[in-house]
Each structure stands twice: as C-alpha cells, then as structure tokens.
Amino acid sequence: MAKNLPAKNKTSSSQNKSDAPFSKVNKLLDKLSSYKNFRSSKKFYIILIAAGLLLLFVYKKSWFVAATVNGSPITNLELQMKLNKQFRDQTLTQLINEKIILSEAAKNNAIATEAEINKKISEIETSVGGPQALDSLLSQQGQTRDSIRQQIKLQLSIEKLYTNDATVAAEEVTKFIEQNKNQLLATDSAGQQKEAFDAIKNQKLTQIFSQKFQELKQKAKIQTF
C-alpha cells in the first residue's frame, strides 16, 4: 500500500495541473463578464459623463467660467441669465419688428437686393472717407458690417414699399431750401434741390412707415414665450 501512495499523489497532482488552465480561463471569463455587466450599467455611463465634464472643465474652462473675482467664479450661465434678463425683451421686440417689415416687403416684392445693399454701403464709405473709415466708425459704435447690412436692408425695403406714397412737390423743395439754406451742405442750386428733395422724402417716408407699421403690427399674429 505504501508503494501505491506515490501513484495516487501523482494522479492528483496531474489532475490539478490539468485543471489549472481552465481555472485561469474561468476567472478571466468571470472578470470579463463583470466588466461587461458594469459597462452596461447606468453607473458606468454616469462615471463616463462625469469624467468627460471634468476634462472639459480642465481644458475648456472658458466654456464654463467667464471670470473669477478673488478666486470666486462668475459662470457663463450666470452671465447669460443676466444678459437675457436685461436685453431679451428689447432684442425680441426688434426681431419681431424686423420680421413684420421683411414679411410685408416679401409680399410686395420689395426686399432690397444684395446689389442695392452693396451700392448703399459704397455710398456710405465714400461719404465717411473710405472702407477703413467706415470700419472704424462701426467699431466705435459697437457695430459690425453684418449689423449695418441688416439695417440698410430694412431701410431700403421700407423705401421700396412706400416710396410711391411719399411724393414731393416742387413747391415743397423750394420752401425747404428757403427755410434751411444755412443748414444745407450743397452750395450749388442742383445740389441744394437734391438735398432738399431727399430730406423731405425721408421725412414723409418716416411718417408713412410709422403709420403703416402700426397697422401691420396690429394685424400680425404674434406669440411670445
């Protein structure tokens, strides 16, 4: 029986060795299964999102913080809420008015074209001393080329809409020159007549537009949220 003992131990040892690889594989499969279950859990995605936000905050801090005062942050959210509270109503009213005007102009085929806008901008550039001079003036007023293009588009569209209603008689031009001769920039007769005509025309357009716009706004279906 003593001789059989080593054989028994040898068999047991051989069995343990043969089981070892399967044991390692089973442990690996268990780990993979646990990892897979973790990835499919809500906790994994919460951690992933939190890590992403942390990286964004570290490398894109300006997206979240507008400024700091003695280490205390002023967030962009605070800034936007403040701006929204102060300027929302004013900006919204302006956008609504623009939409009403351009909608009416579109109905009457009176939208200012790009060529007309460019021509007007060229005239303004000439009057102020060139493109750079205009850019400088716009910068001082906190405006851009895009903003002035939008203003000119509205102005020209209004003129095209109501220019036929704003008629100017020769007598009105003569009277205007007599009353405002010292304020006129032109010195020659033709120049003064054109300047007087444009001034009267613009005055009448303003009056007509004010009346017409109130009518358009009353008819418009406006919903604010």
Image (cartoon, rainbow, N blue to C red):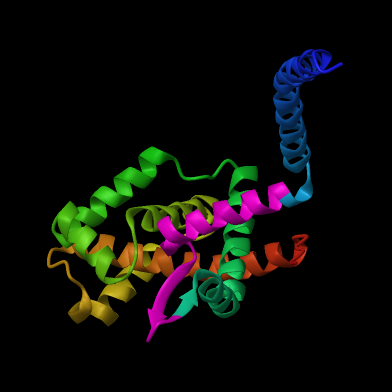
- Along the line of sight, which residue is nearer the eye, 73 or 13? 13
Picture quadrant where residue 189 is located = bottom left
Residue 16: say if magenta.
no
Residues shaded magenta:
44-72
Seen at 50% across and 70% down, the residue is: 76
- Along the line of sight, which residue is nearer the eye, 104 or 143? 143
Residue 194 seen in render: yes
Seen at 76% across and 38% down, the residue is: 34
View extreme (right): residue: 1
Q: Is residue 129 left or right of residue 38?
A: left
Q: Position of residue 2 (x, y in %)?
A: 82, 18
Q: Position of residue 119 (x, y in %)?
A: 30, 45
Q: Is residue 39 left or right of residue 50?
A: right
Quarter of the image with the C terminus in it: bottom right
Picture quadrant where residue 181 is located = bottom left
Seen at 22% across and 59% down, the residue is: 134
- Along the line of sight, which residue is nearer the eye, 130 or 162? 130
Q: Position of residue 9 (x, y in %)?
A: 77, 20
Q: Position of residue 120 (x, y in %)?
A: 32, 50
View extreme (front): residue: 2
Seen at 47% across and 78% down, the residue is: 74
Q: Is residue 187 left or right of residue 135?
A: left
- Along the line of sight, which residue is nearer the eye, 60 or 217? 60
Residue 58: say if magenta.
yes
